Amino acid sequence: MAAFFLDLCAFQTLAVVHRKTIETHGDRWLMARPFPSSGCYTLEEWNMNDKVRLRKNQRHWDLANIQSDVIDLIHLESAMTALNLFEKRQADIIWDKTLIPMELMDVLKERSYVHTFSYLATYFVRFNVTRAPFNDSRVRKALTMSVDKRRIAGRIMKAGEKPASTLVPPGAADYEGPAGLPYDPPAARRLLAEAGYPGGKGFPSFQYHSNSAKQHEQVAVELQAMWRQELGIVMEMRNVEWKVYLADQNAVNYELSRSAWVGDYNDANTFLDSFMSQNANNRTGWKSPRYDALMREANQALDRRRRAGLLQEAEKLLIVDDAVLLPLFYYAGINFYRPEEISGIWDNLVDEHPLYAVKKKRPNVAPR
Amino acid sequence: MTSYLIKRLLGLVPLLLCISFLSFWLVRLAPGSPFDRERAPASPEIERALRARYHQDEPLWKQYVRYLGALREPDAQGRAHWVGGGLLQGDLGPSLKYRNHTVNDIVAQGLPISMSLSLLAFCFAIGLGVPLGVYTAQRRGEWGDYVGSFFALLAFCVPGLVVGPLLVMGFALRWGWFPVALWTTPWHAVLPTITLGLYFAGRVARLMREGMTEALREGYIVTARAKGLSESRVVFRHALRLAILPVVSYSGPLLADLLTGSFVVESLFRIPGIGVFMVNSALALDYNLVVGLALVYAVLLIVLNLIVDVTYSLLDRRVKLG
């Protein structure tokens, strides 16, 4: 039994659903009322682009401990609107990270309702290892070692993101990552020269592929400047729409591609199994039988310490020996709520907050 | 008149078929697939099954005929039967992004809201623009004209993207008179209506001022004045009928602009209308939703233009329909 089996059981893919309702209603089974739910809440209302209303499930086994009768989930697209609603107390909690106005974080950071914490997610860059010159691990290492990650984590990101040297963020259960490649521009230049491009001479200009978003563009600009300055190589940016970005990445149709991964459950496996040869999330063209063997062996290991050692060896192969990815920073989690008004939220690595525990201490006047 | 209406409405059918075919085909030219996700499905079979479920694996012509609902397919016993549903029966198909909603669900939920918002903004634009235009035309070259025309020009020049946040900052955040967003009570409609309608109020005021200035120069106005009618009677009873024609012919495109232009206001004030879907469905490559919305908007625009033409002929008897 893999060590993360219990965590996996709590993950949404294993949520219990009502078979008969699905067989009766087909695709529209979520519209069935009363909605068959085995959870603390039942779905009372779902208005597209508006709100989802959850009501306490009267038939739940632990009814006495469900703290709130009704919870409204408000659908929002704009971070500014989210902040306005929160400021005017028409929303009590902001959980979605995309609804935090990052450009205001310098000002907001000081406020007591802003909670930042370590989060099990990493921002990194994929190399397409099938395309020259990135099929040479020395080139990939040179690019990795010439990036000053503190500059990116500190200057562009505003919520306390930390520079990353590994793929698996620190804090993952029962796991200690390997030492990643260091920031060492002279060594990077030596590696690039060994690969046949002394001083960046003869190095073809290459494309950095990303979906368009302000923060990604800022990261790309920093990378572009560092690589030109440290290695004398020229990077071009290719910003595309989300769906095009996904299609290109899936088809490994890029040279360097902006990437991120959020842990599904608290275990190194959720990050590392993506890069096994047959995994559809690999998207780098990198195939390593040794890596696959290590991952398989790790997940069959009953001894936790042995398993951690095997996973660490696999990660070392991925990010140090073969340098398939360039880790940039570990994300930080951000929640907005006023602790004097809301109870039952505890910051945690996977940013999961069981709704049964959440309670508004003093229900305020209904918003106009 | 009736035969004219019937003719116009019949003309809708081939037009809608054309629009459905074009948008059906164009949206599929965009790179990417509606089923691409940041996380790949656990196996290629899942994606294949998904494609098959929504018939995305069929040749394009077959998909289109199926979309129309004009496809005959063998059933389990091998007998050919009509697949049913489809556009010809008013069924716009399932949404590929919100897979437990149909396009009809989404339109039924969002369209009334977008239409109410547009209608409110329309009334605001006419209600503010027409009096302002009449006022400035009557006082041509005086202070009232300058102030009013300046205001109209300002409204015309500043986009909703700027007006909206300013209104929210003042009236919602600072003074707390109105809610910052959402769409639940009439109070919630005030700021979005102004944001959406202000630009058009400016345009209407300018059109009205021109129209009224022209009308006041007409011979029959001189006659009316010579008869000794009061100025207000001259303006509102005689001149207005002619002066308002440019505004009437503009109100068709105006309503169309309001309907299609509500995206910014809807997302700013988080109004659960349909404008947001117009943009997001294209980005998400939700093929059925894109085509469905294109059709819904086409019908709306055509019907609105028809209403304008009819109104025009009622106001000005010199205009003959046919």
Image (cartoon, coloured by chain):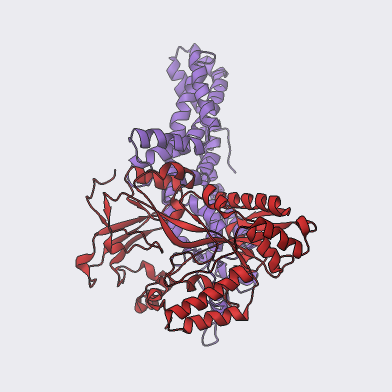
**Residue B146 % position (x, y):** 52, 17
Residue A281 lies, with reference to residue A190, above or below; the image says below
* A167 on left or right of A324: left
- Give me the residue at 67% from left, 67% from top: A128
Q: Where is residue A238 in the image (x, y as percent from the top left)?
A: 66, 55
In the displayed image of the protein, which residue is found farthest to the bottom? Answer: B77
Viewer-side residue, A15 vs B267: A15
Q: In this view, does B247 lie above or below B302?
A: above
Which shade of the palette goes to chain B? purple
Write down the quadrant of residue A43 in the picture. Answer: bottom left
Chain displayed in red: A
Tell me the quadrant of the picture where the C terminus of chain B can be found: top right
Viewed as shown, does residue B90 lie left or right of A187? left
Question: B240 and A159: which one is in front?
Answer: A159
Residue shown at 48% from the left, 62% from the top: A121
Q: Is residue A204 left or right of residue B61?
A: right
Is residue B296 visible in the rendered image? The answer is no
Tell me where residue B307 appears, x and y as whole percent: 51, 43
The residue furthest right is A202
Nearest the eye: A309 or A322: A309
- Residue at 47 percent of width and 39 percent of height: B196
